[in-house]
Structure formats: C-alpha cells, structure tokens
C-alpha cells in the first residue's frame, strides 16, 4: 500500500463517509534525516525539539539539512525519561516566538506528544522525525500528557509530516522495536472488537478501513523473523505499518481500528500502576501480551458452545466496591463514565442470546492463542513474562474491570456477562 496515495484520502467509500487525513508528507527510508529540508519549503523559522538521547541519533543531520531555517533548538536534558508535564510544556513554549512557523520534534512517544501539544496550543504545524518504530501514535491526533499528576490524552492534531530514517530506526532500543511490532499485532484483537461492536451495538464500521488495517497486520506479521535481526526492510515495513494504522484512525476519526480490549487491558495496567505504584510494561509489549490474554478470553467464550441460561446479574453495590478496589483514587471517574454509558443497563445479555451464533462466528475469526504465541516467539517475545510480571490476580482483575475505564464496547463486556461472579 502506497502511503502517499493514502494521504490523498478516499471520497468514494462504500461506507458513505469521506475519508481524509491531514498528514501532508511521509518519508520513510534510509537517509531520510538528511532530506527534511525538501519538505520545508515555506517554513523559515523552525524550532527543533529533542531530548539529549534522541538529538544524539540524528539531530545534527536534521539541523544541517535545514541550514539557516532553524530558529532555535531545544534539547531537554533529563535523567532517565522526559516527562510530558507542565514544566516540559513551558520549557518548549518559551522558545516559540512571533516568527516561529514550524516545530520539528526529533524523538518518539514523549517528544511527539509534547510537540503535538505545544504546536497545537500555538496554532503551528509540526513535523516529527521518528527515532524508534515504537507505537502507532506518530500519526494520531491524541497527545498523552501528564498534567496535575494525571495522565490525560488531549485532542490535538496529526503531524504535517512524519520522517523515519531507517538507519536510525533500526538501531533504536530493541524493546521499542518489539513494542511497535506488538502494537501492530494487537490490531487482530482491536479489529475483532470492532466487528463485534458492529454486530452487538450496531456501531459504524467501514470495511475498507477494516481491510486496510487487517492487510497491514498481515504484512507486519510476516516480518516477525526480521525484528530481532534489525533487518532494514523489516524495520521500514514496520514503521510504514505504524503510520498506515494512524491514517486508518484519521479516516474514521477515532482509534477504533487500532484500539480495543487489548489496549484497555494495557491502559488498566498503566493507570492502576500509576495509582498503586506498581510497574507496568511499555505500551506495545503490554498490548501484544494483552492480545494473547483477550484471545484466551474469546476462546473461553467460544468453548461454552451454547449461551448459558444463568448469566451475571448486575449488582451495583458489589460492582462499585470492585471498582473502588481496582481503581482507588480514580474510581469515581470510572463509575461516572459507566453511569453515563449505561452498558450495564442495556440488557445486552438478550442481544447475546439472540445473536449467539453470529457472535461466536466473529469471535472465532482471529488467530488462536497458539498461533499468537508462535508469532510472539518469532519476534523474541514470551507471554509467560507478562504472567509473571503482573501475576494472575492482577490480570484476572483487568479481564473483568479494564472495560469500565472506557466508553468503547469490546469483547470484555461479553466476557464479564458470562464469567463474572
Ligand atoms: Zn469507508
Ligand atoms: Zn497502541
């Protein structure tokens, strides 16, 4: 799939929606860091933002490519990881002048989020020079920031350009490469949830975007063996996949094609980890292991054969107590969200009974746990690591209560109805 074709959008989709994307340029190739100037024609006062590690990868090359177009360079010096909080926002903001016409971030997750946020706040475009193929957030509108000590995702905008130099990307930390791979493999679960939501709650689906994302997953899956070898073609295809999934999200104006139950589990580990001071894995690793976990849940549902007569009856008092135990200080927000969404009061068990065969057919349409474990093994990942890292109690709790964090319908709701006690 040619990314530059995708950037043009699609106006004749059978779903009836006009699909568009605000990204103007994508350059993913060896030597891309030396070509940034080729897409900066109209910009003459450019601020460059990086941290000391990401600047070290290709900062000088980008600066050299831009010549006298560079207005200022902000390099965050930090011990450990840069945190995208108020201090970081103010520090970058201070560099923006009346003349500034573009912000270019050099980095991955945090630098991308920070530049996305600050450029949006100042109504400026931004470009990202990606330094690791670590997640699909390069091309997304959301900027995940830590403000007031809490993680919040702000709706900002996509970068006007994504530049990925394969020579830099392939030398990024192996865990970040595996994370990007994991984020893509997780789409098996996300796409299945989309289909399920279409069937159960009649949510909008676009077959074109579904297939675009699915084909991207297949292409990435086929490359699993090149991940640990840092094979340049593999890394290039992985980075392209991460951008294509971002475009898929832009096409439908939300993250549905890319984020379902597997992301909900990963957000559960992250949020309860922050609240309870428990460690959590990096994003894509959490997602790919959680993909095995949600597949285990699908297989448990399928194994029931027929829909059981007795299913869970919602007991609000019991539920509130469980949410408080799981979420601690964040429980009130979770309860308010579910009161608003009212999934518990919709009588979904009747829909399950009525559409059981169709639901089972959908749930079967994913790679099995055994197949997923094989894909993971080829890329040097092992589900047992996740089991040991979090422990079965925490994962079991996520299986039942991660769904409550989100407004999105996924297989976690079916599972809860059938397996909650
Ligand atoms: Zn469509
Ligand atoms: Zn993700």
Image: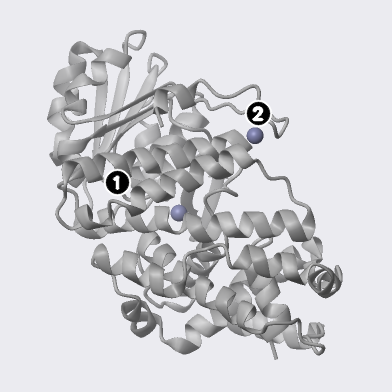
Q: Is 16 left or right of 102, judged from the image as shown?
A: right
The quarter of the rendered structure image containing the N terminus is top left
Q: Is residue 284 above or below residue 239?
A: below
- Circles 1 and 2: CB distance less than 8 Å? no
Q: What's the image's color scheme?
A: one colour
User: Does the beta carbon of the residue at mark 1 sit less than 8 Å from ligand 2?
Assistant: no
**Residue picked out by circle 1:** 133
Where does residue 40 sit, x and y in percent of width and height?
Answer: 32, 14
Picture quarter containing residue 307?
bottom right
Indicate which label's residue lies in the foreground, 1 or 2. Answer: 2
Residue at left offset 56%, top offset 54%: 191
Where does residue 395 sit, x and y in percent of width and height?
Answer: 49, 81
Foreground pick, 189 / 131: 189
Residue at left offset 45%, top offset 22%: 5
User: Does the beta carbon of the residue at mark 2 sit less than 8 Å from ligand 1?
Assistant: yes
Residue at left offset 58%, top offset 68%: 364
Asked whether the viewer can see residue 79, the reply is no
| Structural distance between the alpha carbons of marks 1 and 2 | 30 Å
Q: How many marks?
A: 2
Q: Which mark is residue 13?
A: 2
Where does residue 152 sit, x and y in percent of width and height?
Answer: 54, 53
The quarter of the rendered structure image containing the C terminus is bottom right
Q: Residues within 10 Å of mark 2 (few under 14, many from 20)?
A: some
Residue found at the far top of this picture: 42
Foreground pick, 207 / 323: 207
Where does residue 14 sit, x and y in percent of width and height?
Answer: 69, 31
- For numbered disc 1, what is the local secondary structure? loop
Q: Is residue 5 above or below residue 152?
A: above
The image quadrant in which ligand 2 is located: bottom left
């Amino acid at each position: 799939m040619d990314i530059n074709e995708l950037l043009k959008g699609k106006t004749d989709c059978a779903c009836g929606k006009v699909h568009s994307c605000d990204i103007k340029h994508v350059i993913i190739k060896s030597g891309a860091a030396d070509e940034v100037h080729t897409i900066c024609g109209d910009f003459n006062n450019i601020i460059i933002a990086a941290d000391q590690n990401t600047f070290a990868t290709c900062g000088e090359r980008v600066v050299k490519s831009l010549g006298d177009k560079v207005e200022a360079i902000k390099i965050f010096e930090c011990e450990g990881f840069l945190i995208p909080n108020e201090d970081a926002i103010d520090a970058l903001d201070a560099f923006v002048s009346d003349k500034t016409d573009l912000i270019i971030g050099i980095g991955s997750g945090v630098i991308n989020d920070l530049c996305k946020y600050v450029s949006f706040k100042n109504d400026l475009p931004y470009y990202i020079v990606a330094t690791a193929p670590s997640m699909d957030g390069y091309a997304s509108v959301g900027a995940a920031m830590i403000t007031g000590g809490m993680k919040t995702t702000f709706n900002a905008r996509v970068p006007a350009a994504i530049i990925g130099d394969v020579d830099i990307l392939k030398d990024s930390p192996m865990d970040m490469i595996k994370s990007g791979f994991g984020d893509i493999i997780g789409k098996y679960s996300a796409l299945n949830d989309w289909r399920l939501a279409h069937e159960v709650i009649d949510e909008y689906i676009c077959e074109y975007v579904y297939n675009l994302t699915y084909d991207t997953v297949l292409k990435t899956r086929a490359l699993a063996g090149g991940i640990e070898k840092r094979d340049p073609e593999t890394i290039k295809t992985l980075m392209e996949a991460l951008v294509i999934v971002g475009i898929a999200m832009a096409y439908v104006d939300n993250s549905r094609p890319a984020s379902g139950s597997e992301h909900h589990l990963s957000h559960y580990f992250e949020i309860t980890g922050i609240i309870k001071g428990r460690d959590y894995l990096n994003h894509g690793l959490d997602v790919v292991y959680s993909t095995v976990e949600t597949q285990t849940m699908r297989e448990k549902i399928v194994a029931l054969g027929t829909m059981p007569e007795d299913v869970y009856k919602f007991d609000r008092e019991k539920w509130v107590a469980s949410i408080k135990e799981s979420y601690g200080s964040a429980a009130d927000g979770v309860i308010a969200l579910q009161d608003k969404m009212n999934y518990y009061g919709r009588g979904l068990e009747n829909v399950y009974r009525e559409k059981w065969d169709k639901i089972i057919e959908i749930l079967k349409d994913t790679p099995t746990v055994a197949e997923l474990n094989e894909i993971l093994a080829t890329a040097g990942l092992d589900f047992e690591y996740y089991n040991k890292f979090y422990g079965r109690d925490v994962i079991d709790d996520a299986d039942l209560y991660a769904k409550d964090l989100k407004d999105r319908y996924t297989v976690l709701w079916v599972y809860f109805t059938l397996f909650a006690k």
